[in-house]
Amino acid sequence: MINSIKKIIPASWVQMGGHPLRQPLPNNYVENIGPLLLIHHHQSVIKEGSKQNEVGVGPHPHTGFAPVTFIYKGNVNHRDSRGNNSVVEAGGIQWMNSGMGIVHSERPSVEFAANGGEQEIIQIWINSPAKFKKNQPEYFAINKEEIKVLSFENLEIKVTVGNYQSLIGFNKAQSNMVILDIVSTGKCKHIFTLNKGWEHAIYNLDKDILVNNETVKGSDLVIIDNDATEIEIEFNEPTRLLFFDMEAINEPIATYGPFVMNTQTEIMEAMRNYQMGKMGVLIEE
């Protein structure tokens, strides 16, 4: 098999709002992979007896993109300025097309904060095409039971977003993409198909794997050549991957913190909208 790996990049450690986390993307090599702008991998232990408003991430704004949270351990209580309030447990996903702007918080549930335990999440940011950036915000809770799974010996491929091998995942993304949540439980090998001309990447959460016979360590991000149509992954022990296959939007990107637009003028407008309360207000009880 022809080697189609562009780059293997170890995740760096960053602080985000006082929370230490791994950041595979952006990095010193690339700012974005198609519409994929950011990957944050956070693991923590919530102390027993914690209060909900003392843990997690408090109210903050977003506009112009989709913040998406994959919940691996624990749970996340999403609340926002549009009145949405839901708890998604481990194995589920929270997806929000932020559109013209919204304020939300992401914290463990009241019960989980009180009982304590491990929490592990990955949040990704997916850019929205310009034509969707001024839309009304949308929030979707995707529970574990709703996600379709391809099962092989020692391997599960969860089709979380888009269409893959006749299975249909979440379909409210604002551009074309496939996101697979992959879990191996032992030795196995699998060839994954890709859309030629799209942008492709793999984030390895745990143990070493071989991608087209190249070693990829835990917390490494693999960037794959756009022209690749398949890639072989070999697993020798249990591990987890996030697999991205995304069509590029090919529009200018302007960013400032939680705002992602096409121009600096639009960024200034988004900041004013937030300061004037046009994105709504979230008061946590």
Image (cartoon, helix red, strand yellow):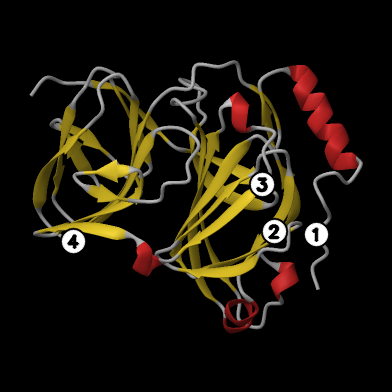
Disc 1 + disc 2, Cβ < 8 Å: yes
Q: Earlier in the sequence, mark 1 or mark 3?
A: 3
Q: Measured along the vertical axis of the image, is residue 45 above or below residue 204?
A: below
Q: CA distance from mark 1 to mark 3?
A: 14 Å
Q: Secondary structure at mark 4?
A: loop
Q: Is residue 206 visible?
A: no
Q: Which is more N-terminal, label 3 or label 2?
A: 2
Residue 116, how many percent across, how many down?
A: 57, 78
Q: Are marks 1 and 3 in contact (CB under 8 Å)?
A: no
Q: Nearer the viewer, mark 2 or mark 4?
A: 2
Mark 4 / mark 1, whichever is N-terminal = 4
Looking at the rendered structure, the kind of residue marked 4 is: Thr
Crowding around mark 1 (Cα neighbors within 10 Å: few <14, some 14 to 19, many 20+) is some
Disc 1 marks a residue whose amino acid type is Leu
Which tag is nearer the camera, tag 3 or tag 4?
Answer: 3
Q: Mark 4 and mark 2 in contact (Cβ < 8 Å)? A: no
* Position of the C terminus by quadrant: bottom right
Compare residues 121 and 49 and report the one nearer the observer: 121
User: Which SS class for mark 1?
Assistant: loop
Label 1: which residue?
Answer: 282
